[in-house]
Image (tube, helix red, strand yellow):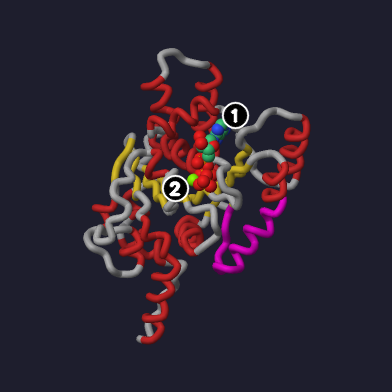
Amino acid sequence: MLAYTVYSEAGGVGKTTLAANLAKAEERAGNDVLLIDLDTQEASLSHLLDVAGDRNDKEADSLLRHMIDRPRGPFEDLVKTSEGMDIIPAHNILEYASKHLQRRAEEASDFGESFNPNKQLLRVLRGAGVNEAYDTLIIDPPASPDIKLHNAIHATRHLVIPFEPSGKGYESVQGLDDIVGGLEENLDIEVGVLAIVPNRYEGLNTQEQFLGELRDEGWAVPVTFRKRSSLLEGCWHQQCTAFRYIDEHRDRDRDHELDTLEKFDELAEYIRRQKEVPA
Ligand SMILES: Nc1ncnc2c1ncn2[C@@H]1O[C@H](COP(=O)(O)OP(=O)(O)OP(=O)(O)O)[C@@H](O)[C@H]1O
Ligand SMILES: [Mg+2]
């Protein structure tokens, strides 16, 4: 199974947009896809793909319940579907993931059991046979580097990193080695960066130069995305991927928008090929 977390240190750079559309590109390529939303913000993947449901219902089953050994039902019942993809929506209780996972770890420790709070998503996914049931797993974590991100990384071990090629975005990408190194040390595993993805690229000389430097340093920068506000805002409005948006909500094709779809397909394929080659 191909698995990755769409991660960025900065907020609002296009993680959720990228996760949804890469997943759709995988589905279009004939793969069985599972998406997991770990972000409790309103403007989340669950909202974008219109599977949010009642995320406040305390009694409802949720992924976190499974992670702390208090499931209310089978794993399969957590899964919703949208545009041919399976997705586990975020539940608001995830905001307290750290507290509940730490508590469970303390309890386990008192009873002489082992319980790594960072590896519970991995445990749940393994137990549910996700590895065998799906071709592709994509996780959309919150921007803050907390226990949910750690669980996402343990479960996927690979990152796809969007960033905005300007000021702050440059800084965060220049610090990537440290960030990835820090995560590896913290979690005691290897973490692979499958691609870094410039978003809202405008073709400026300074941007071009910066991307050149990144490639020289050995980062994979296979595809850049231009600013496509009308298309991507439209997706949030209609709650769908860019593929469905153009299919159902545009009465004529716009070449630059079709070009964006091609880039999602191209990036998904590039990432797939990266994983096929043993490191
Ligand atoms: N290439 C682009 N051109 C124009 N707008 C874009 C582009 N990519 C994303 N956006 C818009 O930017 C906003 C933020 O995108 P998105 O929610 O995907 O980012 P995010 O990194 O998931 O944010 P957060 O950190 O809040 O989770 C959205 O309104 C989205 O439509
Ligand atoms: Mg997001």
Picture coordinates of residue 123 (x, y %)?
A: 38, 65
Would you say 101 lies left or right of 133 here?
A: right
129, above or below 102, in the image:
above
Q: Which residues are magenta?
A: 174-192
Q: How far apart are the alpha carbons under marks 1 and 2?
A: 23 Å
Residue, disc 1: 227
In this view of the protein, can residue 272 be seen by the observer?
A: no
The residue beneath circle 2 is 138
Mark 1 Cα-neighbour bin, 10 Å: few <14, some 14–19, many ≥20: few
Could you say where residue 52 lies in the image, as x and y percent from the top left?
33, 45
Q: Is residue 189 above or below residue 75?
A: below
Amino acid of disc 2: Ile
The percent coordinates of residue 221 (x first, y second) are 64, 39
| Residue drawn at the location 67% of the way across and 50% of the way down | 172
Q: Give the answer, above or below, for where 27 lies relative to 249.
A: below
Q: Secondary structure at mark 1?
A: loop
Image point (38%, 34%), residue name: 239
User: Quick check: is 5 in the magenta stretch?
Assistant: no
Which of the 4 quarters of the picture holds residue 63? bottom left
Marked residue nearer the N-terminal end (1 or 2): 2
